[in-house]
């Protein structure tokens, strides 16, 4: 089918054949993953939208696509507004929209392997007001009309060595067995791919940029486990690594094993397991206990081995970033570079480390107005030149066996305007305020989010994304449960060992985007009154911040001191990895602001 309009027509015809009056198409897979394999990219195939979060609803006469504030511009660029309504979440939910738009008495289909039970209950209630019903389908109608749908990846699993993991899989499973006994459950279902990879100390290549394998797992209170995965993906080394306490079964046997849990108390995470799993356990006669996946928190709280590995990866990645920025400082002003050529050159610098396994996500390389598209991905159709007088926003990261990196820098190509410098400095002040936060145990990310936004808010400005997300250890670049945001999460108390991003931004539609992102580690910071523990952030990323964009007279002495100390630390860690012109560039880029701040401010043009 050559066009997305053709695909929409084909889906509507298929819905008629399946006696449905509508269908919901989420961007996820049967593991509720954020990033999915090609076989699960149903939303992109149907609509053309290439973001990493969204949903669509197709009715006989209407169709709507739902995205959050990160994709407000992108979805309108990629999806035909003649055929799709654009809806923003969380202002509007799929369920709420269905409650208004679904035909009276209609049958709205959904794939129970792609939705949580909570969503099913919410949508069912919303449809009831129209006398409509939500119908679970046995066969996804999108798959029925997607003729060239790719097969799931056949990539093999690989062991994740304990020298990187810091703890054996057996020890992790023993801890989970103790947790199950305390919760009085016989077994726990694991469906989140990063939880399975972490628990069994294995990695895969089934999802682009995320080293996970398509699998399910069932853990038992006696410490034994069953791993459900395509047998072709397991070799003798992996079997030996898993040990005798782990039975490897075909992935297709998962539901059959669930059917044999009659009378067993089974823990299932309602936020990470799809509705179909709950239905299978209900049908089997199991006692379901809705408890959080026991891998989630220990995975988020990095052990000392993982922290050391992450710092090693950051130092390596920081050197690649410094080489890239040196190259850009020479080639950018010359002209002839594009968003894609810049992205490719940065990847090459990372590859030259000899340790890069993959990027941690598709590099966001946005020049001028494309930088205002928060999760922009350059294509041949959108590829802009890197031009003098513009800002270039580059958000990128690498997957290394010892750690996952994620960093954003915004660079002035030529001389920036005063407005660019002013707003960059507001973002920088927010970044510094969060980096310097000290907070008591029990503090949630939602309580810290305002620190990064306060200076923008004071001038009537803001950004439509969270300020910080968790980061995995050679796993997902977006990892929960920790988050710094006032919406869509941020309720998990922060603990020492958690790694998060610190990434406030500002985006002027049609002109430029600004984001400054470092990764930070939650660390202990003494005690307060009544011996209450206090925590702080240790900044892990080491890459110069473009001083040409800093309106230094808008910084307080403490903020200026933070920048100088950050650059001194960057020079200390990255400098020994460079030499010649690259080292000289780094030394200049890390020079104290106090030495030439009047010059940098004067460089901002009106």
Image (cartoon, helix red, strand yellow):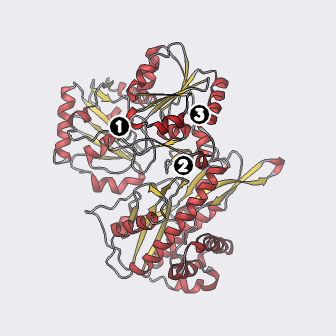
Q: Is residue 522 left or right of residue 341?
A: right
Q: Is residue 591 left or right of residue 525?
A: left
- Check the picture and name the quadrant holding the N terminus: top left
Q: Secondary structure at mark 1?
A: helix
The reply to whether dot 1 and dot 3 touch (C-beta < 8 Å) is no
In-front residue for pair 497/347: 347
Q: Earlier in the sequence, mark 2 or mark 3?
A: 3
Q: Which mark is residue 19?
A: none
In this rendering, the answer to whether 538 lies above or below 138 is: below
In this rendering, the answer to whether 214 lies above or below 74 is: above
Task: Give the mark toward the camera: 2 or 1.
Answer: 2
The reply to whether dot 2 and dot 1 touch (C-beta < 8 Å) is no
Q: Mark 2 and mark 3: span between their CA atoms?
A: 16 Å
Q: Secondary structure at mark 2?
A: loop
Residue at image coords 34%, 69%: 341
- Check the picture and name the quadrant holding the C terminus: bottom left
Quadrant hosting residue 298: top right
Is residue 230 visible in the rendered image? The answer is no
Residue labelled with disc 3: 294
- Neighbour class for label 1 at 10 Å: few (<14), some, many (≥20)? some
- Neighbour class for label 3 at 10 Å: few (<14), some, many (≥20)? many
Q: Mark 1 and mark 3: span between their CA atoms?
A: 34 Å
Quadrant hosting residue 114: top left
- x then y, percent, for residue 126: 38, 29
Residue labelled with disc 2: 472
Q: Earlier in the sequence, mark 1 or mark 3?
A: 1
Residue labelled with disc 1: 97
Task: Give the mark toward the camera: 1 or 3.
Answer: 3
């Amino acid at each position: 089918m050559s066009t997305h309009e053709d695909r929409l027509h084909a889906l509507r015809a298929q819905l008629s054949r399946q006696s449905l009056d509508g269908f919901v198409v989420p961007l996820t897979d049967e593991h509720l993953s954020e990033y999915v394999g090609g076989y699960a990219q149903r939303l992109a195939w149907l609509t053309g939208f290439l973001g990493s979060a969204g949903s669509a609803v197709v009715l006989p006469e209407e169709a709507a696509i739902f995205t959050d504030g990160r994709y407000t511009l992108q979805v309108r660029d990629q999806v035909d507004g003649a055929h799709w309504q654009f809806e923003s979440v969380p202002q509007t939910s799929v369920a709420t929209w269905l409650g208004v738009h679904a035909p009276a008495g209609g049958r709205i289909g959904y794939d129970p392997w792609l939705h949580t039970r909570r969503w099913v209950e919410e949508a069912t209630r919303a449809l009831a007001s129209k006398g409509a019903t939500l119908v679970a389908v046995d066969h996804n109608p999108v798959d029925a009309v997607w003729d060239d749908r790719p097969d799931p990846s056949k990539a093999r699993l690989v062991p994740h060595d304990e020298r990187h993991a810091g703890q054996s899989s057996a020890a992790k499973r023993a801890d989970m067995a103790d947790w199950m006994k305390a919760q009085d459950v016989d077994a726990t279902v694991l469906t989140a791919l990063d939880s399975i990879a972490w628990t069994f100390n294995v990695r895969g290549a089934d999802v682009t940029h995320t080293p996970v394998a398509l699998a399910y797992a069932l853990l038992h209170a006696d410490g034994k486990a069953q791993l459900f995965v395509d047998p072709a993906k397991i070799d003798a080394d992996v079997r030996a690594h898993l040990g005798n306490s782990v039975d490897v079964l075909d992935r297709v046997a998962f539901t059959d094993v669930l059917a044999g849990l009659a009378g067993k108390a089974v823990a299932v995470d309602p936020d990470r397991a799809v509705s179909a799993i709950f239905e299978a356990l209900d049908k089997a006669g199991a006692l379901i206990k809705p408890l959080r996946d026991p891998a989630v928190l220990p995975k988020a709280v990095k052990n000392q081995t993982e922290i050391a590995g992450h710092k090693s990866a950051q130092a390596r990645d920081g050197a690649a970033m410094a080489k890239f920025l040196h190259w850009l400082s020479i080639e950018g002003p010359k002209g002839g570079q594009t968003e894609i050529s810049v992205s490719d050159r940065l990847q090459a610098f990372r590859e030259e480390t000899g340790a890069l396994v993959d990027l941690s996500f598709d590099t966001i390389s946005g020049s001028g107005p494309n930088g205002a598209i928060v999760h922009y991905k350059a294509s041949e159709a959108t590829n802009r030149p890197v031009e003098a007088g513009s800002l270039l926003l580059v958000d990128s990261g690498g997957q290394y066996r010892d750690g996952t990196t994620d960093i954003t820098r915004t660079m002035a190509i030529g001389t920036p305007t005063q407005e660019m410098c002013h707003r960059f400095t507001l973002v920088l002040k927010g970044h510094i305020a969060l980096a310097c936060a000290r907070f008591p145990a029990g503090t949630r990310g939602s309580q810290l989010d305002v620190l990064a936004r306060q200076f923008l808010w004071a001038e009537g400005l803001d950004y439509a994304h969270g300020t910080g997300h968790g980061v995995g250890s050679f796993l997902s670049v977006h990892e929960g449960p920790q988050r710094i945001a006032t919406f869509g999460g941020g309720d998990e108390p922060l603990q020492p060992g958690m790694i998060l991003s610190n990434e406030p931004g500002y985006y002027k539609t049609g002109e430029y985007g600004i984001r400054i992102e470092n990764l930070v580690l939650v660390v202990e910071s003494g005690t307060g009154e009544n011996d209450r523990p206090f925590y702080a952030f240790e900044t892990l990323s080491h890459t110069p911040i473009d001083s040409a964009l800093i309106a230094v007279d808008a910084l307080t002495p403490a903020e200026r001191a933070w920048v100088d100390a950050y650059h001194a630390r960057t020079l200390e860690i990255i400098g020994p990895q460079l030499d010649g012109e690259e080292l000289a560039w780094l030394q200049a880029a890390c020079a104290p602001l106090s030495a030439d701040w009047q010059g940098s401010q004067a460089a901002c043009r009106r």
